Amino acid sequence: MGNELLGPHVGIVQDICSRIEALRAGGPPNGPRVILLRGPAGVGKSRIVREVYERLAGQSQSPRYWPPLPEIGDRILTERKVLAPPRETMHWAERALPEFAWWELSSEETSSGLLRDGASSLNAQLLMHAVPLAAAKLQHTGALQRLGSAATGVFDRVRDVFVNEGADFAIEALLDAVGLFVPVPRALLDLTVDAAKGLGTGHRRRADVKLDVDLGAQHNERQRTLTAETADALREAATPELPGIVVAEDLHFMSGDAAQLLDRLLVPDSEHPTLLIGTVWPEAEATGPYAEWLAGQLPGVVAVVDVPLLGTDDLIALVRQRAEHTDEAVARQVGERLQVPLAVEMFLTEGKAKRDIRRNNGRLTEAEITGLPDGLEGLYEDRWKQLPEPTRWALACAVATEPLGDQFARFPVSAIISVLRETLDDQVADAEGSLRYAIDLSGWCLDQDGVQLFTEHLLTLRASRFVGGAFSEADIAEFRTIARREMVEAIDRDRVLLSLPDTKLATLMCRWYLSLTTAEDPNLVDATALWRRAEEEAARGSLGTAATTAHRALEVAGGHLDLRDTLLIDLRHRAAVWLGDSGQALRARGLLVAMFQEVVERSEPGRLHPITMDLRADIARFTGLADDPEGAVNLLHEQLEQQAAFYGPVSRAVFTTQIDQLEWRALFDPVVAIVRAQGLLMDLYEPHGGRDARFHEPHNGRFHDLGLRVLRFIAGQHLAAGNVDAASEFFGRLLDEQLRIYGENSDEALDTRLNLAINTQNSGDYAGAVAAFTSVIESYEARLGSRAPQTMAARSYLAILICAEVDLDQGLPMLKELMVDQSEVLGPTHPDTFDSRFRHAMFTSQLGRNRECIDLLEQLLAELENARNATHSHIDFTKLLLREALQRGDAPSA
């Protein structure tokens, strides 16, 4: 009842579905990746999103994986916000596989900065749907057929594990059965150490496409934030047959965290087509993170669809969906006064109107619409006045106490109940019941695991207006003092040393507490709240700030706790890693060495334990990053002995450490590193059938990614050493495996093809290299578009090769076109753009146009000197080139 879409909104749904079908058919990667439904509050944007879901789900084959959404009943304010199937009612039906991916990013998440929470809806959705999507991907790509007899019963076995034991065990089941790694943030899984190590490398994606032999990519990989991992997992779950759709309501309230996630999510990628559908207000495009994010999108990425107001005839039809026998004149008055669908439906579902319709056999009478308010805000005003007085006082108290200026005035329910009982007991006799009324009966608020928030920003504003006339500054100060005391009690009750449950409520309590605290004598509650803040900062990628905050938390805790406690060692370990990954490897190493000695001296847990081995692994890593690769190799040798004793000699942990050791050894003894890598390659093959075995076969599928990593390492070492034939052999073997496992246009295969082209160039076969670069560029463009970073990197290789070795007149326009694209996409002083700009200037000089070269270098130098992100090395190098150009005889331009 009241769910049928009307008027021009039907066409909008059809257009969105057509775009999704274009993605499914391998549509152009440069087409719109964002559809913004823009319109005033209540115009029907959320209803359009719901209808898109219903159409996609309804067109799926039976048995359907995606169930219908709950119908919109009488709780309009909250029920219309349900844009995805509720997780608690979602069930993976037998033999059902999804035909698309659907992710809901709620307005509460986009605006709050709480995306880091392991219990957030996005990450819970990932755990719910990633395994079924991976199973569907196996079916669509034909991977099961390539696995032969190993494919028998895979879906049934994995589904049974998923239903009976949970997502983490189902992920392991897929890994064991077919060697498939499911893209899901590692932080969300509670697997064994051995399995977790597998997930650590299984679904990695290279951020760069150039071959790095200096471990730079490995170091950067460790700095991926949970936000980035979530975005990558959402995107990687999609395929051309299973397009991904992310829906985000009230995107105009987005925080910086949400902008970061969306930028990562919206990388153009025809292999993982993902579409964002967002709802926004027109007036929100002027300021804030949303305005900045929108302004930063490239042309063609965002399609803004203005959602029109429904016409009078459509609003009459909407009235009759809930009161089918209403006279046209009465229905017309309702539509003309209330103007938007939300207001019409709110009015028809409130008590008096509902009773009138029921008593008159489905007809709304003229008497009932006397005094009808104007528009949605007028209706909200009426609804506010209809709330019981205690509920109005309770909601106003919550808004007044909330210290963070939150758009939705999130508040811990227990804190506001305490405030009400101590200060407003005359106005609010039943504090808990008054707040519960705002949730259960009026739909004014939502309750999410103990965090209550206003359903609409307009409702927050209405409660705020009540505050000014009801409470003095002294009242508000008293409210916040009581709320802070409640935070102290709750944090102290729920903490384990410095750790709190990974929930939105715990995070919100810590935020409130820190904003309300000026403690001169900090205690364990302060330390716990600071630690949660450090976790939030680390999740955003602000690792240096996180390390500083964590140090302060541990410093405070040190006055009350024994920091040698095993659980606190773990927190200290995390803080040291944040410090090291922020660029302070030597300091981090010192902290970790001290911790290691403490643990070993106490003999509990001792040297032969995952805690100790994890410490040693990071000590080795930061030893290497502090310019001591030999020291790293020696530490990893000891690590191998301990891991072999604990996990067994044939284990992922042992093989992974051996590869880490090889990568560090290559920095000072590359010949020995290559020899040992070839031996390790045999170890990975031989136990399972000799050199003709395949890494992805079921019996050794868990190690196939490690075999590929070793092949890539050997090939890269030969490439760096100029061993053209050997590099070609190992890159060829690597490519064969990647094509077999991942497919022709996978990230892995394209990266290897690019490296093969580089190797062909190094061999002196310039015509072959041009053909190879051209081929890989065509593949990148088909998948990612011509201006994706990976594509532009390949274009750079080709343009420079043609300029230097083939035909300068042909290559220079290619380089100039690339330079323009890099400037627009990456920025005019980005390192890649800088590389193209100075080469363009130098090649221009070789054509005898030295004055033009001088002009180009002067412009580049001026921009570098005014840019915040420019490095001194780039500035100095440009000055050197400019001096040399001037010495060739031309004066600088006037």
Image: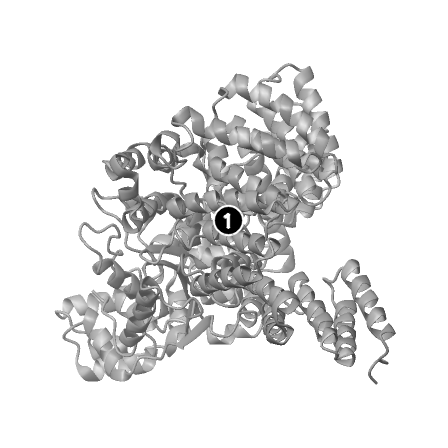
- Compared to residue 687, the image places residue 578 above or below, namely below
Would residue 42 be found to the left or right of residue 232 on screen?
left
Q: Quarter of the image holding residue 525?
A: top right
Residue beneath disc 1: 205
Quarter holding the C terminus is bottom right
Would residue 654 be found to the left or right of residue 59 on screen?
right
Query: Hey, what amino acid is under mark 1?
Result: Arg
Quarter holding the N terminus is bottom left
The residue located at (49%, 53%) in the rendering is 753
Q: Secondary structure at mark 1?
A: loop
Residue 391 locus on image (x, y percent) = 43, 56
Residue nearest the viewer, comparing 209 with 847: 847
Would residue 665 be found to the left or right of residue 6 on screen?
right
- Compared to residue 650, the image places residue 764 above or below, namely below
Its colouring scheme is one colour
The residue located at (18%, 69%) in the rendering is 357
- Compared to residue 166, the image places residue 842 above or below, namely below
Residue nearest the viewer, comparing 496 with 811: 811
Would residue 803 be found to the left or right of residue 33 on screen?
right
Which residue ends up furthest to the top in the rendered image?
603
The residue located at (39%, 56%) in the rendering is 104
The residue located at (17%, 52%) in the rendering is 62
Residue 268 in view here: no
Residue nearest the viewer, comparing 239 with 459: 239
